[in-house]
Image: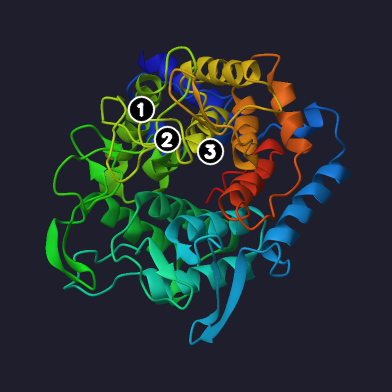
Amino acid sequence: MKKVVLTALCIWFFAGFPLTGQDLKESQSGFVPRTNGAYFTNKYRNLFRENGHKKKEIRAKTDEAFRLLFQGDSSTTVFFEAGSNENGPLAYISDVLHHDVRSEGISYGMMIAAQMDKKAVFDAIWNWAMTYMYVSSPEHPSEGYFSWSLKTDGTPNSETPAPDGEEYMVMALYFASNRWGDGKGIYDYKAWADRILTAMRHHPTKKGMTKFGPRTVHSMVNEEHKLIRFVPNFEKNDFTDPSYHLPAFYELWARWGPVGDIDFWAAAADSSRDFFVKTTHPVTGLAPDYANFDGTPYSTPWNKRSANFSFDARRTQMNWAVDWSWWRKDPRQQELSNRIQAFFASEGMNTYGTEYSLDGKMLNKSHAKGLVATNAVVSLASTHPLARDFVEALWNTPVPTAFNERYYDGLLYLMAILHCSGQFRIWKP
């Protein structure tokens, strides 16, 4: 076995693929990393090119989406400049429909900026997050986290976090560090990524007062199941959100993150892959908005959609498809992709709804652009002939700029354009 592993490692090295500590560890245990995932090959599929669209047209479509959503006027934009402070310019991403700023949107804006090489945009959004969202007081139960919702003037609507914001922030900060290099203070991107990632796993259980009353806040992960939590501030009924599971990111954290947590994030990636299979319907491939850690749907009195495929859940299939594109560790993700695309195609490529029961009963007839977007990303993993049709459906979908869609649908749309054109990449050290 040692001879086989050594030979494989030699081939791996001389083929030009850099080895990480995690790769060495896997190889020493007898596992030789695959070479056909984008992390190893540095090759990203351009699904639009595969459908016959020209590079110039693809670039124009990407630029137009960014221009409308980040540089447009008040009728299209979600990006708003907000003055400056000692750290430089400030800007935020707003959920214009609900008149607030969410850690989710901030983190998506940071990721889009990192992928599109928009450093000034990235820094301004990050500065706003650190100025208004970050909880630094040692007495506060959310110390080390970001408040998930604030008014556009920075006044908090909540002082507890939602893990999807921290997850994308951490990944965007690592990419920023690797692409642009680290600066000083809040712009020491890697140091802050390490710090937030450490808090996500090791935040102690803290009780304390917030502006909204006493709260108890925990870590963002369930150690027993090695899965991300829905929120870290529930006293009882611990559960998860399938769309928060990002094994493609966890694999990178197992390579780049704090050394003491390497094993945990590697295991969390595998746990999330298993979870996708458990939580999706065996016929439709649909996942619920919220789920127990065994994958079964979780119902809440304050979210009537939580046990159905609804607004959160549409991100789940994007997450497993990107994981397949980057790592190619779990062929079940191809089966899941074929299954969910077959279901939506059976509902009508241009007429399927946006909310369903898990067994496929339509609950909302609207045809959401954000769901069109994430279903196109599924084509990175799908082997079904329908995959091309889902990509073309995204190509033919205009940028979501309506007041009720530009924030969530718009950001998912722009990220999907980047994924489907091979521009959403792993930026390595």
SS at mark 3?
loop
Give the residue number, with chain letter if any, for mark 3: 18
SS at mark 1?
helix
- The x, y position of residue 361, in whole percent, is 49, 21
Please state if 172 lies on the left or on the right of 393 as rendered.
left
Q: Do labels 1 and 2 touch, CB within 8 Å?
A: yes
- The x, y position of residue 259, in whole percent, is 30, 48
- The x, y position of residue 129, in whole percent, is 44, 69
Q: Residue at x 60, y 47 (%)?
A: 409
Q: Do labels 3 and 1 touch, CB within 8 Å?
A: no
Asked where in the image residue 380 lies, by quadrant, the reply is top right
Amino acid type indicated by mark 2: Pro
Give the residue number, with chain letter if any, for mark 2: 247
Q: Residue at x 55, y 54 (%)?
A: 111
Q: CA distance from mark 3 to mark 1?
A: 22 Å
Give the residue number, with chain letter if any, for mark 1: 270
SS at mark 2?
helix
Point out the frontmost of discs 3 and 1: 1
Quadrant showing the N terminus? top left
179 or 271: which is nearer to us? 271
Counting residues from the start of the chain, the first of labels 2 and 3 encountered is 3
